[in-house]
Amino acid sequence: MPSPALNRPEIDAKTEILTALGDISQVEIAQNEVLLAIYRRPEKTAGGIVLPHANLKEDKYQGKVGLVVKIGAACRFVRTGTDGVQYGIPIKLHDWVAVRTSDTWSLEINADPNVSDPNAFVWCRLVFDDQIRMRIPFPGMIW
């Protein structure tokens, strides 16, 4: 079941995730990995359909969209090949990106040491920099 703090329509998804995640400034990740907070669909669709909690929980396992919340120091999103041609996608903090879920490591994070409620944790994924498949303008674009 989604956290009560999540899925409030008056708050945009990016703000919602960053608020729920808390201060992760002391978190250190591997040099060439990226920490993504998984996008969770709203309980009510644009057409007014209320999604069952069982369907929403699938975002934890099937969600392909994440918000970049931490970037390893050695990440290189744009690379230059041996032929001198640059390739890749420039990714920065707080971009929405899409990944193949099987290329990621799933974990849950809450930066508040005094919180043990499982619903207060944010669903996240760790992914290598070269496994990010695309940058997208808004999270509801992909399912």
Image (tube, helix red, strand yellow):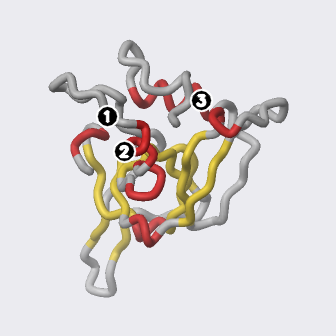
Vertical position of residue 124 compared to residue 46: above or below: below
Mark toward the viewer: 1 or 3: 1
Which amino acid lies under the numbered mark 2 shown in the image of this protein? Asn
Q: Measuring 27% from the left and 37% from the top, which residue is drawn there?
A: 138
Q: Is residue 56 visible?
A: yes
Residue 92 in sight = no
Q: Which mark is residue 34?
A: none
Q: Position of residue 47 (x, y in %)?
A: 15, 25
Compared to 107, does 18 lie above or below? Answer: above
Q: Horizontal placement of 86 versus 92: left or right?
A: left
**Against 132, is 95 above or below?**
above
At x 49%, y 27%, the residue is: 6
* Label whose residue precedes the other's in the sequence (3 or 2): 3
Task: Single out the residue that lies furthest toward the left.
Answer: 47
Image depth: mark 3 or mark 2 in front = 2
Q: Is residue 124 above or below residue 39?
A: below
Mark 1 and mark 2 residues within 8 Å of each other at the beta carbon: yes
Q: Residue furthest right?
A: 114
Asked whether, in this view, residue 89 is left or right of residue 66, the answer is left
Answer with mark 1 or mark 3, whichever residue precedes in sequence. 3
User: Residue at label 1?
Assistant: 51
The label shown at residue 55 is 2
Q: Where residue 78 appears, x then y in whole percent?
A: 36, 64
CA separation, marks 1 and 3?
A: 21 Å
